[in-house]
Image: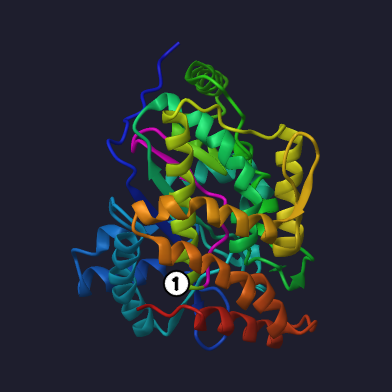
C-alpha cells in the first residue's frame, strides 16, 4: 500500500479561496464570461493573474490568497486581488456575486470550462454533476504534523453547524425558495466523494481509504476527495470547505479568523496531551442538516449525551474560549466580529428579506443586486 505523504507546515499559516459567480449587471443572470475576465486581469495586472482561477463552470472565478500568517494579511491579499478583478468585471458590465447559489439561474444553461478533469466529473456524475450550480469558500490552516490532522478534523466537526449557519447564503435555487438556509450544503454532498469526512483516528486508516479509492477507480488524485473538511496533503494544511459562498468581505474576515482560531486551539490541545472531543457520526450528520435547514435558528446536538442548544448561544461561549488564541494570532477584533453576523442577519436571511416571500424573477433580480451590493472591498 502506497503511503500518503503530508507536507507538514512549520507554523499555522492560512490561505483563503473565495468563489464568485459572474452576473450580468442588467439582467442579474449568470454569464459565462470568465475567460474574458481572466484576459482583463492579465492585461491590467499580470502579477495578480495567478491568484485568479477558473472553476468547473465558465460563470465562475475563484480568488485565492498566498500563504499568510494571519487573518489581516489574508484579507489584505484578497482585497488587492479583488480590486483588479472588479475592475476587469466592470469593463464587461459584470458583477461579482458571492453566495452559495443563484436564486433563479437555470443549471442547464451554463457552460463548462474546457478541462479533462471536469469532463470526467460530468461524464461520471451526469445529472447530479450538472446540478452543481453552487459556490463556496475554502480556508486552509497549516498543521505541523500529519498525526494531528485527523484528530483535528474529527473535532472540528463539532463546530460544523456554527460555520455553516454563519456563512449560509443559498436559500433559493432555480427560481424557488427551498426552505433551507444552505441549499448548497445539501446539493454538494450528492457527489460521490463529497460530504462529511470519515472520522479516522490514525493516518494509516486514511492511507487505506485512499488506496481503496484509487484501486477501485473512485479517484485518481487526492484532490478528488471533496470532503467538507479534508487534508490538503501537498500544502500541509487542513482545508475547511464547509462555508457557503460569502457575500460580505467583513463577514468573510470574521469567519476566516474563527476557522484559524479553531484549528490552532485544537492543535494546542493536542500538544498539551488532551484527547479532543468528538461527536458520534450520526449527531454530526444531523447537525449538518439542522444548520443547512435552519441556519442561525438551528438547535444543535452538543455531545454524545444528547444535550442540545441554540447554535448562536453555543457560538457566544465558543468565542470566549477562543479569545486568548485570537490575541496570539492578532485577530481578536476579527474574531469578535463574528457576533455581528447574527445581529445583522446572515446572508440567507437578508436575501429572504429582500424577496419578502415573492418568488418571481423580478424580485430575485433584486436579491442578486442586494448580494452584489454587499461586496464592499476596503
Q: Which residues are magenta?
A: 232-247
Image point (51%, 80%), residue name: 374
Out of 288 and 120, give the one closest to the viewer: 288
Residue 150 percent coordinates (x, y): 51, 29
Count up the numbered dots: 1
> Is 177 on the left or on the right of 56, as rendered?
right
- Specify whether residue 278 is in view: yes
Residue 19 percent coordinates (x, y): 46, 61
Image point (56%, 22%), residue name: 201
Q: Helix or strand or loop: what does disc 1 sit on?
A: helix
Image point (64%, 81%), residue name: 367
Image point (69%, 74%), residue name: 349
Q: To which quarter of the image does residue 109 belong?
A: bottom right
Q: Main secondary structure of the magenta part?
A: loop
Instruction: Determine if the magenta segment contains residue 334.
Output: no
Single out the residue that lies furthest toward the top. 1
Q: Which residue is mark 1?
A: 249
Residue 234 percent coordinates (x, y): 34, 34
Out of 194 and 30, give the one closest to the viewer: 194
Instruction: Determine if the magenta segment contains residue 240.
Output: yes
Amino acid at each position: 500500500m502506497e503511503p500518503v505523504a503530508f507536507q507538514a507546515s512549520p507554523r499555522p499559516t492560512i490561505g483563503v479561496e473565495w468563489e464568485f459567480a459572474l452576473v450580468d449587471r442588467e439582467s442579474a443572470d449568470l454569464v459565462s464570461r470568465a475567460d474574458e475576465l481572466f484576459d482583463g486581469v492579465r492585461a491590467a495586472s499580470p502579477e495578480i493573474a495567478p491568484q485568479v482561477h477558473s472553476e468547473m463552470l465558465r460563470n465562475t472565478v475563484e480568488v485565492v490568497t498566498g500563504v499568510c500568517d494571519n487573518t489581516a494579511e489574508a484579507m489584505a491579499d484578497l482585497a488587492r486581488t479583488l480590486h483588479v478583478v472588479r475592475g476587469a468585471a466592470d469593463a464587461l458590465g459584470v458583477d461579482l456575486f458571492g453566495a452559495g447559489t443563484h436564486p433563479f439561474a437555470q443549471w442547464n444553461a451554463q457552460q463548462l470550462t474546457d478541462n479533462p478533469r471536469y469532463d470526467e466529473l460530468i461524464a461520471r456524475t451526469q445529472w447530479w454533476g450538472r446540478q452543481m450550480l453552487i459556490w463556496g469558500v475554502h480556508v486552509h490552516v497549516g498543521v505541523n504534523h500529519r498525526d494531528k490532522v485527523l484528530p483535528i478534523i474529527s473535532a472540528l466537526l463539532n463546530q460544523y453547524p456554527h460555520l455553516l449557519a454563519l456563512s449560509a447564503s443559498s436559500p433559493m435555487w432555480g427560481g424557488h425558495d427551498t426552505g433551507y438556509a444552505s441549499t448548497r450544503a445539501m446539493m454538494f454532498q450528492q457527489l460521490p466523494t463529497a460530504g462529511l469526512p470519515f472520522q479516522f483516528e490514525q493516518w494509516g486508516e486514511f492511507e487505506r481509504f485512499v488506496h481503496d479509492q484509487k484501486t477501485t477507480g473512485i479517484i485518481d488524485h487526492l484532490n478528488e476527495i471533496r470532503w467538507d473538511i479534508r487534508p490538503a496533503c501537498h500544502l500541509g494544511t487542513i482545508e475547511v470547505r464547509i462555508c457557503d459562498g460569502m457575500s460580505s468581505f467583513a463577514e468573510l474576515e470574521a469567519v476566516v479568523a474563527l476557522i484559524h482560531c479553531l484549528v490552532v486551539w485544537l492543535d494546542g490541545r493536542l500538544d498539551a496531551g488532551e484527547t479532543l472531543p468528538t461527536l458520534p457520526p450520526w449527531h454530526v450528520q444531523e447537525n449538518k442538516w439542522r444548520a443547512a435547514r435552519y441556519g442561525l435558528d438551528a438547535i444543535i446536538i452538543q455531545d454524545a449525551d444528547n444535550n442540545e442548544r441554540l447554535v448562536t448561544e453555543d457560538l457566544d461561549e465558543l468565542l470566549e474560549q477562543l479569545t486568548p488564541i485570537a490575541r496570539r494570532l492578532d485577530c481578536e477584533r476579527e474574531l469578535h466580529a463574528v457576533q455581528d453576523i447574527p445581529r445583522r442577519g446572515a446572508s440567507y436571511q437578508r436575501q429572504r428579506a429582500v424577496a419578502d416571500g415573492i418568488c418571481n424573477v423580478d424580485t430575485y433580480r433584486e436579491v442578486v443586486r442586494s448580494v452584489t451590493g454587499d461586496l464592499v472591498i476596503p
